[in-house]
Amino acid sequence: MSDAVSRTVLERGDKWINRAFVVNDWYISAYEPIIDIHGERVGILYAGYLEAPFRAALWKTLAVVLLLLIGLLGLIFRVRLQGRGIAHSHVFTAANISKIALYRVLFAIAAYWATLSHWLYAWDEFLWIAGFAAIEMNVSEWRDELARGEEQAA
């Protein structure tokens, strides 16, 4: 046990809740003094759980969020290209390839969650895919509607 835990729990009699290096790994730990019938601190009660699974889940979540942000930025970039009338350039082709790659990555993530039987996470990925597809369809319809309006005005 570290000196900080010993001072906090045994000397001052306070609870100590923080991360701690226990034996060979980091844990989310809580220490509390054990007090006898005379009010004397006679020991410490410890409870903790391994931090690594939570840290791994955090990094996976951050990776998914990063991919989704990249996909959203790609969609915005693609819409701006369409708005400028650039629909057949190499940049637009690269944007289409990136979009397809993003959809494949999202499907792969959904499949990964499904193989682990995390159906809620898999469903979440499918909702992201559906959301991106719906946004793309709405933007395309909006562009067509604007083009029709400009033709009618001319």
Image: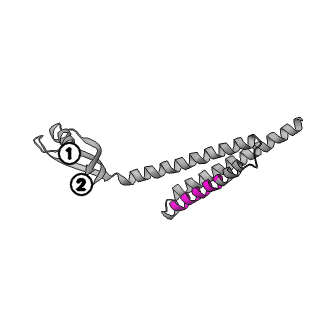
Residue at the spot of label 2: 23
- The magenta region covers 98-112
Disc 1 residue type (three-letter): Ser
Which residue is outermost to the front?
90
Which residue is outermost to the top?
153
Residue at the spot of label 1: 2
- In this picture, is 30 found above or below 106? above
State the separation of the CA atoms marked 2 and 1: 11 Å
Indicate how the structure is coloured in the image: one colour
Please indicate whether residue 59 sits to the left or right of residue 134 in the image: left
Please indicate whether residue 115 sits to the left or right of residue 51 in the image: right
Please indicate whether residue 36 sits to the left or right of residue 29 in the image: left
Indicate the position of residue 27 as horizontal and vertical percent values.
30, 50
Please indicate whether residue 131 sits to the left or right of residue 85 in the image: left
- Please say whether residue 51 is one of the residues in the magenta stretch: no
Indicate the position of residue 71 as horizontal and vertical percent values.
60, 48
Name which residue lies at 51% across and 59% down. Answer: 113
Front in this rendered view, residue 153 or 38? 153
Name which residue lies at 64% across and 52% down. Answer: 98
Indicate the position of residue 153 as horizontal and vertical percent values.
88, 35
